[in-house]
Image (spheres, grey):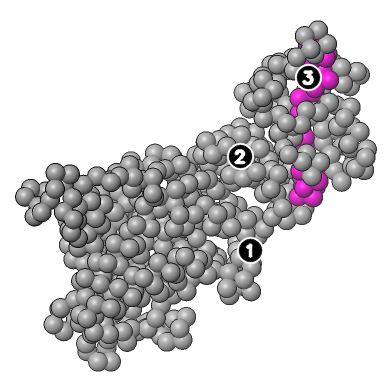
Amino acid sequence: MASASASHSDARFGLDRRVTLLGPLPLDCGAALAPVEIAYETYGSLNADKSNAVLICHALTGDQYVASSHPITGKPGWWMRLVGTGKPVDPARDFIICANVIGSCMGSSGPATVNPATGTPWGMDFPVLSIADMVRAQALLFDYLGIGTLAAVIGGSMGGMQALSWPVLYPDRVRAALVIASTARHSAQNIAFHEVGRQAIMADPRWRKGAYYADGDVPASGLAVARMAAHITYLSEAGLTEKFGRRLQARDGAAGADCDGSSFGFDADFQIQSYLRHQGISFVDRFDANSYLYITRAMDYYDLAQPHDGVLARAFMGTKTRFCLISFDTDWLYPTAESRRIVHALNAAGAEASFVELSSPFGHDAFLLECPEMNRIVDGFLRAGANR
Amino acid sequence: MTALRPDLRIIADNIDAGSRVLDVGCGDGALMAALRDSRQVRARGLELDPANVSAAVTRGLSVIQGDADTDLADYPSGSVDYAILSQTLQTTRAPHLVLEELLRIGRQAFVSFPNFAHWRIRMSLLTHGRMPVTRLIPEAWYETPNIHHVTIDDFRSLIATRGWTCDGEWFLSGDQQTSRGMANLLAEHAVFLLRR
């Protein structure tokens, strides 16, 4: 991903960047955040007229490592199927930025960072955030980077909420918005699943009202259960059946196992159990429980139509941004109907918009997986912008 | 634009440069791409088939996956210069309502459809007594998407009943333009330009 460009001599650009901006950043809750720490990465180089900036927005538990290996897990970037050399978002053409959202735990201001008033981690004293707050923090970052207008903002899931919010909050600063597997509001069902996750964390005796940073004894069990519950919503029943069915775990010398492999106890007999447990346990190594509370809360409060008397079309009135929405037919977390609702509002607002529902067995997670058709659409949509 | 279907060719040749267009049932966006590339037309599309939508968006066109029968209501009145419905009218559940929507959204509307009263279809029905299967109507009755077959005279009658104005009409036979005379018998295909 390295490229010999002028921007590489600029310390603001490159991998694993951190910046502390003075702020204050006024928040929807009424409080203000200062300073504002933002951890981010950039790929490619900013062209002379600064017209090739593409912002990638990450999802709930994502981070800025969109196309470089994760410092904790060592895994490759989370969207390298879409971002990289020869991919639809290509550092040879685009100047790509991905920033950790505020409230998160990979270097941007959040409950685990230090509260300047006390010199200790914020914990639950961190102000409650909104999706719009996350977007405003990104805009602060672009002020710092000297980028006025984005060629495109791209996101899936919660990243899609940010991508959709960008042209609403900054109509003159974004030329194209690509919103994948996302929604314009959190539904009662979405909020309900998040509430289960939050209650699991808060019910963990190690949570201690969020003040667990001093001794590092984190509410790992609560966070793991939250992740397990959420992970089910990212998959589809058909996908689960195909991948796991009722298959049992192959275990040697399982105590009391009968000839079928059933323990008649509460061990992880079924493959789906051990898969979910693995998802939960590996998650706690890389994510902060309080961040999980804050970000899920921001998603629950998200409703783009609310400041516009509940009329979504008004949020987009007069927009000059081009929109592209993609949904997946097996996604029941943010189903196609939610994308259609956005499309209807965009049509009513006279916006230039594209929308397609793609077929995939993988549920909500489909946007992160191999999907050649999605890549072709993203490529065509972005190139159409580059041609004008 | 050489590869354009003949009815699309007629529509393309009669659209003002730089105008705004909504192509309802735009397929893979062939007409929209031609209009954009040769006439700087700002085109948007609506298409039912997801594979077609993908193909159109991949070409850089703004196309929404949706249904002409249900998804036109959101488009603001008078928001485009031309609404286009090519070879789609006969597949809609309520063609008259779709046309009303078209004429509400566009200042003018192009409508093209295969003429069910073409002499070859009449002959086929007369001699075989079976639902005709022709070049322009290639599917058998049980699998055809064409659920509302229409003739040129039927369409003219609808125009009169609804009080619409016809700003132009073109007729095709064997991919060549043919005269107005006895069009209901001799034309395989018709293109109308309407306004309310």
Q: Badge 2 is on which residue?
A: B48
Question: Residue flagged by tag 2: what amino acid is it?
Answer: Leu
**Residue B6 falls in image quadrant:** top right
Q: Position of residue B153 (x, y in %)?
A: 89, 27
Furthest residue in direction top, as rendered = B127
Q: Which element type, helix, strand or loop, lies under badge 1?
A: helix
Q: Which element type, helix, strand or loop, lies under badge 3?
A: loop
Q: Mark 1 Cα within 10 Å, few/some/many (few <14, many 20+)?
A: many
Sequence order check: which comes first, mark 2 or mark 3?
2
Q: Which element type, helix, strand or loop, lies under badge 2?
A: loop
Q: Position of residue B117 (x, y in %)?
A: 83, 20
A288 lies left or right of B73: left
Q: Is residue B114 magenta?
A: yes
**Residue A210 falls in image quadrant:** bottom left
- Distance from label 1 to label 3 (Cα)? 42 Å
Q: Position of residue B186 (x, y in %)?
A: 84, 16
**Residue A348 falls in image quadrant:** bottom right
Residues behind callouts 1 and 3 on a single chain: no
Q: Magenta residues?
A: B98-124
For disc 3, the chain is: B
Q: Mark 3 Cα within 10 Å, few/some/many (few <14, many 20+)?
A: many
Q: Badge 3 is on which residue?
A: B188
Residues behind callouts 2 and 1 on a single chain: no
Q: Nearer the viewer, residue B155 or B123?
A: B123
